Image (cartoon, rainbow, N blue to C red):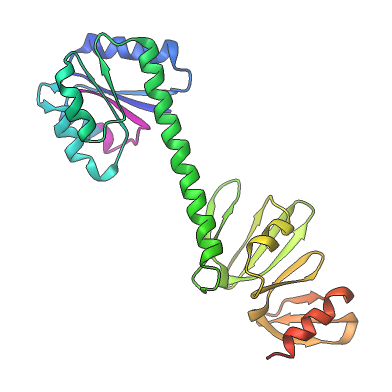
Amino acid sequence: MKVLVVDDEERARESIVQMLTLYCPEVNEILQAEGVQSALDVLSKHTPAVILLDIRLKDGSGFDLVKQIGERQLPVIFISAHEEYAIKAFQVSALHYLLKPIDPDELIAALNKVQEKNEREKLEQQLAILVENTQLINRSSSKIVLKTLDSIHVVPVAEIIYCEADKNYTTFYLDGKPKIVVSKSIGEYEELLPSHMFLRIHQSTLLNLSFIDRYDRSDGGMVITKQGHQLAVSTRKKDQLMAYLNTL
């Protein structure tokens, strides 16, 4: 967790930094600023997980800073020696309010709120993707998220030509784009992808039916895609594929 500490008193900043170092092992980087402008300078280069923000600053107030970074919606924990600012702090969606001198247990509890908020937002994002992949399943614009070691790909379902299994890995062959290899089994994607668009024509192959160019009866049965891929069809799945082709 990256934390930005904003306080115009150096001793106060040092005290907070010391507490974070001693009591908050999840904090791996601490940034510092002494006022509104210096905080904006830091934020132009970094995106902290939370801002520990004093209310009274030499070149303005913590509320002034919040107004200027409003669009970024960064979690803010206000710090003040005065209780009267608490109501206003929560009116501007402060995540927490700490009174000086800061109690370490209160600081830990405040940072726990940040972690809970981050986890909740991640879950909400995952649920939103799931909803899009299920409730919007009949729309050609529906997407699927494919996570690799290096990237997170948002792929339109309509661009998937076929999926190929290799043990616990699945390779996605896309129309006009490089293939993507993910470390999940093909069975998981068979459940997720729309059944009216995709057919498991072989134990190792899940085909997007819209990309079929022709079916060759030779060699036990072979689907040729519009891109020229030659995909074997298992005996068990041949009747199901024929039934689909007869509806065209």
Near-viewer residue (236 or 222): 236
Near-viewer residue (44 or 184): 184
Q: In this view, does 148 lie to the left or right of 4?
A: right
Q: Is residue 238 magenta?
A: no
Q: Write the residue at 43% across / 24% down.
A: 112
Residue 79, percent from left and from top: 24, 19
Q: Write the residue at 27% across / 35% down.
A: 43
Can you see residue 155? no
First to last magenta residue range: 42-55
Q: In this rendering, is residue 157 above or below 90?
A: below
Residue 247, percent from left and from top: 70, 90
Q: Quadrant of residue 48?
A: top left
The N terminus: image quadrant: top left
The C terminus: image quadrant: bottom right
Residue 8, percent from left and from top: 17, 18
Residue 128, percent from left and from top: 48, 54
Q: Quadrant of residue 137?
A: bottom right
Near-viewer residue (170 or 242): 242
